[in-house]
Structure formats: structure tokens, C-alpha cells
Amino acid sequence: MDIEFTDPRLASIETGAAADTRLPVAVIQSARQRLSIIRAAPDLRSLYNWKSLGLQSEPNSNYHLVALLPQWAITISIAEKNSIMTVIVTAITEQLRGVA
């Protein structure tokens, strides 16, 4: 699959300029690993079948979440362009959990 980024700052996560994203180092490392797994996927079914990827569908939208760390996730959408599946990375966000 191809990967595109909506934000040029996020595109730098796979380069030596990853510090410009101001994300924690563990998040950058995990994102790089997840993006390489997504690139290796032959189709969308493979992404859903790889449980370690942690792919979840957002309710009532065409966005999906890919788990990075327990409280971080990549928001993606999947489109077909010229008969090639393309994953569009829209955000890397911190998921706030409920505090007891």
C-alpha cells in the first residue's frame, strides 16, 4: 500500500527531521514500525487481520485508528487511487483515558 500524509510535518516522521514533529521518541519509533507494516500489507483485509496492528474503525466515519502506544494512535483513512490502495495519515494523537 502507498502512504500519504495530509500534514507535511507528519511526513517528516520517517526522516531524520522527526524531532520537528515534537512527538515523544517512543511514539515516533512506534509510528515508524506501524507505517512499515502498513506498507507491507497487500490489501485492507490484511490490516484488519493483523491484530498486533490494533486497527479500529471510527464509528460513523471512514477514519480508522492504528494503536501506537497505550494512549497514542494514528488516524488514517483508506482510499483507492488508480486501483492502488492508499493509506492517508491525517493525525497522530494522544488518546485521553478516563481518570478515576
Image (cartoon, grey):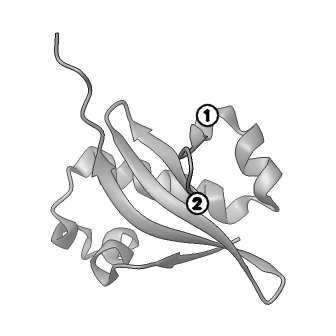
The disc labelled 2 sits on which kind of residue?
A: Ser
- Coordinates of residue 35 in the picture (x, y in percent): 53, 60
Secondary structure of the residue carrying numbered label 2: helix
- Coordinates of residue 29 in the picture (x, y in percent): 37, 51
Comparing 12 with 95, the one in front is 95
Q: From mark 1 to mark 2, how far is it between C-alphas?
A: 13 Å
> Are the two marked residues, 1 and 2, in contact with CB atoms closer than 8 angstroms?
no
Tell me the mark number nearer the camera, choosing from 1 and 2: 1
Which of the 4 quarters of the picture holds residue 56? Answer: top right
Position of the C terminus, as image quadrant, is top left
Secondary structure of the residue carrying numbered label 1: helix
Specify which label sits upstream in the sequence, 1 or 2: 2
Q: Residue furthest top?
A: 100
Comparing 96 with 27, the one in front is 96
Position of the N terminus, as image quadrant, is bottom right
Q: Check the image and report above or below for 39 versus 17.
A: above
Q: Residue furthest front?
A: 60
- The residue depicted at 75 percent of the width and 58 percent of the height is 41
Please give left or right for residue 23 compared with residue 85 in the image: left
Please give left or right for residue 25 compared with residue 8 in the image: left
- The residue that disc 1 covers is 52
- The residue that disc 2 covers is 36
- The residue depicted at 26 percent of the width and 26 percent of the height is 97
Q: Check the image and report above or below for 93 versus 19.
A: above
* Residue 19 numbered mark, or none: none
Comparing 60 with 34, the one in front is 60
